[in-house]
Amino acid sequence: MNESSLMNQRNVFPGLCIALMIICLYHIPLRSVAADTAESKTIYTQAEQVGMIVTPEISEASGLASSARDANLFWVINDSGNSATLFAIAVEGQIRARYTIADTPNYDWEDLAGFSLDNQPYLLIADVGDNRAERSGCSLYIVEEPVVPDKPSTETALLPVKWRISFRYPEGPRDCEAVAVDARQKRVLLLSKRDTPPVLYEVPLMPVSGTVMAKPIGPMTTIPPPTLEELDQPYGFSWSRPTAMDLTNDGNRLIVLTYKNAYAFIRQPGQSWPAVITAPPVSIALPHPTTGLLPIREALCVQPRTGTLFITGERPPAPVFRLMPL
């Protein structure tokens, strides 16, 4: 090989490397290149199955809330295309009671949150789903948490709405499936689903007239993106999308559920939410999606007295998993 040929090869190789780097960066989303920034320390026990929702009445469990009246009772709602019904279920998954929400359509109910004001427990139904980004506005319905009879009933009672919050987003329609109530600050937190990264918003919790504008708190930049291997899986591209959210009773631990894992964003004293959501969260390991143990995980709640997490899926039969804080 002569010197001219050798020099040509030396010049081509660095250029080829640079070209390949540009191609990779162009085709791989920026968040896919970033390292997994979630902390791996253990703050909850391993996920343990404690129940199973098998009734066909709860065919698409999209929201879960822990009862403030009974630690062994949960509230569940169905996704769009179902009736405007609120179900009370036992930890094991059996239906205890049913309530129709008066004069309230189920356009796309996507999350459910429990909270208390002046010692009165409430439930917030979040009609915020918007897969096609076509809704001009969304609604939050607040009802008083009913007292469930000790004996299970097959009848459906009527439950009135105490107040409604109508809102829209400043940038236009957004899909959202993750909602939490910060009762101490009297605000509702909403996390967009299809933005990269997802964006956290807030609206006032108390009754307001007309339609309010959601206020952006900031992008949640530290939920780990799917790995290259996960992107090869069916729907692996969506595994990092937020599907549910809840806040601990002290208001300092925001739990976000995705199709893969859950993440705890922990607020230190005096820390702002924009600072919290851009810091690395603590990863909460769940059964991997490929195991089929918890399919389409779209509902999560925090038990207000104990801080225990409960998670279930949208596809029946839907197992109920429990994770206790350490």
Image (tube, helix red, strand yellow):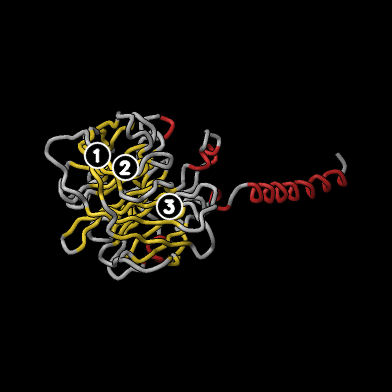
The image quadrant of residue 277 is bottom left
Q: Which residue is mark 1?
A: 156
Amino acid carrying label 1: it is: Thr
Q: Are marks 2 and 1 in contact (CB under 8 Å)?
A: yes
Residue 46: x %, y % from top left: 27, 39
Give x and y (percent) for residue 191. 42, 55
Secondary element under disc 1, as helix, strand or loop, is: strand
> Which residue is painted at 39% across and 33% down in the image?
315
Q: Label 3 to label 2, Cα distance in Å? A: 16 Å
Of residues 58 and 190, the one drawn nearer to the viewer in this rendering: 58
How crowded pointer 1 is (Cα within 10 Å; few <14, some 14-19, many 20+) is rated as few
Indicate the amino acid at tag 2. Thr
In the displayed orientation, state which residue is furthest to the left. Answer: 150
> Looking at the image, is mark 2 or mark 1 nearer the viewer?
1
Name the one closer to the observer, 31 or 292: 292
Q: Position of residue 25 (x, y in %)?
A: 64, 50
**Kind of residue indicated by mark 3:** Val
Label 2, label 1: how far apart the Cα atoms are: 9 Å
Q: Looking at the image, is mark 3 or mark 1 earlier in the sequence?
A: 3
Numbered mark located on residue 128 in the image: 3
Q: Residue at the location (47% across, 51% down)?
A: 193
Q: Quadrant of the N terminus?
A: top right
Q: CA distance from mark 3 to mark 1?
A: 25 Å
Dot 2: few (<14), some (14–19), or many (≥20) neighbours within 10 Å? many
Does residue 137 lie above or below 94 as drawn?
A: below
- Residue under pointer 2: 85
